Image (cartoon, grey):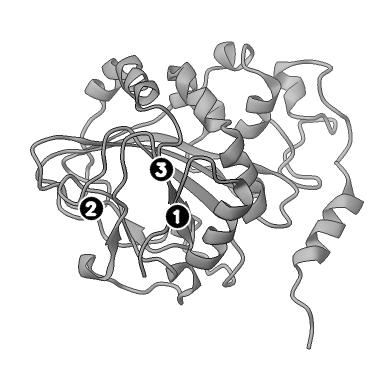
Amino acid sequence: MPIEHLAATAGSERVAALLERDGCCVVDRMVDPALLDGMRAELGPYLAATPLGPDSFSGRRTRRTGGLIARSPQARELVQHPLVLETVKATLKGATNFQLHLTQVIAIGPGEPAQPIHRDQWAFDLFPFPKGYEVQCNTLWAMNDFTDENGATRVIPGSHCFDDRLSFKESDTEPAKMGAGSVLFYTGALYHGGGANRSRGVRYGLNLTYTRAWLRQEENQYLAVPQAIARELPLPLLRLMGYARGAYALGYVDDLRDPIDVLRPGAGETGLGDFGRADRRAREIRPQSS
């Protein structure tokens, strides 16, 4: 099955529909490549200082640079891209709230072999989530062109509906070839992996991912972003980072305070949240009995 490509003018309904059907799609040239060039320059010192991966999964010729909310104003904008947030909301059906899961530039160096094919949602202690219940929605922005030669991420369209804990080879996958400024959307249940870099250059991808807010974040945003920086960030971004209740009664501080009050006293609401709203959402996605 080929990877479907959409124009930058596509709406979130179409992107979400393809994620439900195929588990992935590419939106071509969603931003000007110059914006991502500027971000790479902005992050230059951090990219250079990041050590190579310690194992074959993270990549011994690959650098993974995180903490992007603290380090890059450009990243803060992309994290809140309207099409992305609307697609995440539509994909994570029934969620009271969703949050930023990780921010990472993945720089695959020359000579790196293909990454093992996996599901990103395995990070949640390999828990076997029910088929069709998506807990994670991901974006991978091409900071330079993704080609078969330089390690374009490889995916298996439709595999979000497969059984869990399956094994695949690189030959079972399709490369997500796309130009700089384009974005690969994919769910946490999709089988995929970084491609082998057989070129002489580095493949740069910007991975920004989102999860249901009752799950633990892969990247700890509270420690990755110092409070001195966090206090200056806009409220919507702070809530996306996790300064919000994860669902009814999840994540409050001391005397039922809204987490946002830690950074912005008086900006939050008291109490445990809206149980009725959470219950209605849960009923919307609850399997119907036969």
Is 43 positioned to the left or the right of 110 in the image? right
**On residue 195, which mark appears?**
2
The amino acid beneath tag 2 is: Gly
Disc with the residue nearer the chain's start (3 vs 2): 3
Of the two numbered discs 1 and 2 on the same chain, state the one appearing first in sequence: 1
CA gap, disc 1 and disc 2: 17 Å
Which element type, helix, strand or loop, lies under badge 3? loop
Q: Rounded to the nearest whole Å, what is the CA distance between mark 3 and mark 1?
A: 10 Å
Q: According to the image, label 3 marks what residue?
A: 28
Q: CA distance from mark 3 to mark 2?
A: 19 Å
Horizontal side, residue 246 vs residue 50: left or right: right
Which residue appears at 26% of the width and 49% of the height?
152
**Amino acid found under the numbered disc labelled 3:** Asp
Q: Position of residue 144 (x, y in %)?
A: 27, 34
Q: Nearer the viewer, residue 179 or 267?
A: 179
Numbered disc 2: secondary structure? loop
Q: Is residue 212 visible?
A: no
Q: Which residue corresponds to the image point at 48% horizontal and 47% vertical from the top-left?
A: 138
Q: Is residue 235 above or below residue 99?
A: above
Q: Nearer the viewer, residue 78 or 289?
A: 78
